[in-house]
Image (tube, rainbow, N blue to C red):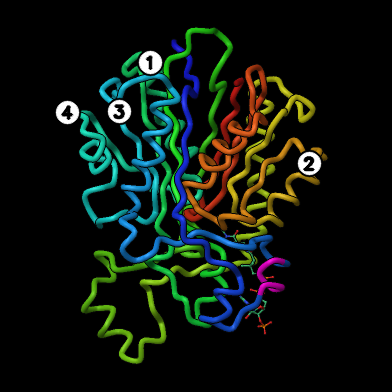
Amino acid sequence: MYQTKIAGLGKYVPENVVTNDDLSKLMDTNDEWITERTGIKERRHIKKGDGNTTASMGVKAAKIAIERAGISKDDIDLIVFATLSPDYYFPGCGVQVQEMLEIATCPALDVRNQCSGFIYAVSVADQFIKTGMYKNVLVIGSENHSGGLDFTTRGRSVSVIFGDGAGAAVLTRSDHNGQGILSTHLHSEGKHALELSLKGPSTNHWVPKIIAENPQGDDIPYYPYMNGQFVFKNAIQRFSEVINEGLQENGLSVSDIDMLIPHQANLRISQFVQQKFKLADDKVYNNIQKYGNTTAASIPIALTEAWEQGKVKEGDTVVLAAFGSGFTWGSAIIKW
Ligand SMILES: CC(C)(COP(=O)(O)OP(=O)(O)OC[C@H]1O[C@@H](n2cnc3c(N)ncnc32)[C@H](O)[C@@H]1OP(=O)(O)O)[C@@H](O)C(=O)NCCC(=O)NCCS
C-alpha cells in the first residue's frame, strides 16, 4: 500500500466583498445579529459579469495548487470535484475542469456531500493513490452560493451564512513512509436529509410541479431550507465524535493536534469544539469571519491560508473535520 500526501494547495475567492451592512440593505438583518450568532463579518459573492462560476473558480484554485505541487496539469490522473452548487444539473463540474485545464482526457467525478464534500473527496482520492491506481489526484471544493440564495427577509436565517469561493489540493503518492494522510473517517445519517436541503428543481420537484404546487410562491423548494438549531446540535456532537475517532484510530491524543481545521460552518460551532477539546487558539484555524460558510470549499480555503501563513508545517499533525447536509460528516488525520 502506498501513502498519500498533500503536495500543493490553492484557493480563489471572488473579489466582491459583501459585508453584513450590505445585506441589511436587502433584508431585515443587522451586523450585530450576524456577528453574534455566526461570527461572520463579510463574505464574497460572485458579481454579475466577473466570469466566475463554480467550475471556473475551482480551476483558478487548482492552477495554484498544481504549480505549488511542482507538477504539470498533464500529470493529473484523476479529478475529484466536491460541490453542492454545480454549474449544471448535469454533467458535473469535474469534466468542466478537465476541459478548462486543457487536460487531454482523464477521469473526473463529482462528489455531492455538501459541507463534508472536501473530506469525502480527499478520502476517495486517498483510496485511489493508496492502491497504486493513480499517482496525482486533483481535489477541488468550490461553491457558488450567491447564485441560489433568497436575499429577502424570508431567507435571512440561511442567506447571511453562505459565501462563494474555491479551494484545491493536489494529492500525490508520498515517498516518505509515515508522512501524509494517516486515515479518513466518513459517516452519513440520511434520516435527517431534509433538515438542511434544497429540494428542487429535481426529478421529484420539477419546474411545472413547483409552480403548480406553489401558486402563491410561499413554499419555495428551490431555496435552501435549514433547521438551524437542529443542525447546530448535531454538528457539535458529530464534529467531536469524528475527531475522536480519527485520533483513536492513530493512537493519538488531543495534545498531539498541531492544527485543527474545522469546516467553517459557524464560528460558534468551531469555538464549541475548541473548548470541548481544550485546544489553544493557535491550534484551530478559522476564517469564517471573512468568507462565511463556503461549504465544500471551506476546508481547502482554510487549509491553504493556514499553510501560506506557516501555521501548517512539516511534521505537524493536522486534523480536518466537517459536518453538513445529509447529514454527512467526516475527518482526516494528516501528518504533514
Ligand atoms: C442559523 C443560526 C445562526 C440561527 O441562530 P439561532 O440562534 O438558532 O436563531 P433562530 O433561528 O432561533 O432565530 C432567532 C431569531 O432571529 C431571527 N433571525 C433569523 N435570521 C436572522 C437574521 N439574519 N437577522 C436577524 N434576525 C434573524 C429569527 O427570525 C428569530 O426571530 P424570532 O425570535 O422573532 O422568531 C444557528 O441556528 C446556526 O448557526 N445553526 C447552524 C447552522 C450551520 O452551521 N449550518 C451549516 C451546517 S454545515
Q: Is mark 4 on a helix, strand or loop?
A: loop
**4 or 2: tag closer to the N-terminus:** 4
**1 or 4: tag closer to the N-terminus:** 4
Please tell me the numbered disc located at residue 281: 2
Q: Is residue 80 magenta?
A: no
Name the mark nearer the viewer: 4 or 3: 4
Quadrant placement of the C terminus? top right
Q: What element carries label 2?
A: helix
Give the residue type that dot 3 points to: Leu
Given contact means CB atoms under 8 Å apart, are the residues at marks 1 and 4 in contact?
no
Given contact means CB atoms under 8 Å apart, are the residues at marks 3 and 1 in contact?
no
Q: What element carries label 1?
A: loop
Q: What residue is pinned by disc 1?
A: 131
**4 or 3: tag closer to the N-terminus:** 3
> Which secondary structure is most common in the magenta stretch?
helix
Q: In front: 214, or 109?
A: 109
Bin the neighbour count of mark 2 within 10 Å (Cα to Cα): few under 14, some 14-19, many 20 and up. Answer: few
Q: Which residue occupies the extreme top position in the image? A: 176
Give the residue type that dot 4 points to: Ala
Given contact means CB atoms under 8 Å apart, are the residues at marks 3 and 2 in contact?
no
Give the residue type that dot 1 points to: Thr
Q: What residue is pinned by disc 3?
A: 78
Give the residue type that dot 2 points to: Asp
Distance from disc 1 to disc 4, alpha carbons, whole Å, reads: 24 Å
Q: Which residue occupies the extreme bottom position in the image? A: 216
Distance from disc 3 to disc 2, alpha carbons, whole Å, reads: 36 Å
Q: What residue is pinned by disc 4?
A: 104
Distance from disc 3 to disc 1, alpha carbons, whole Å, reads: 14 Å
Q: What element carries label 3?
A: strand
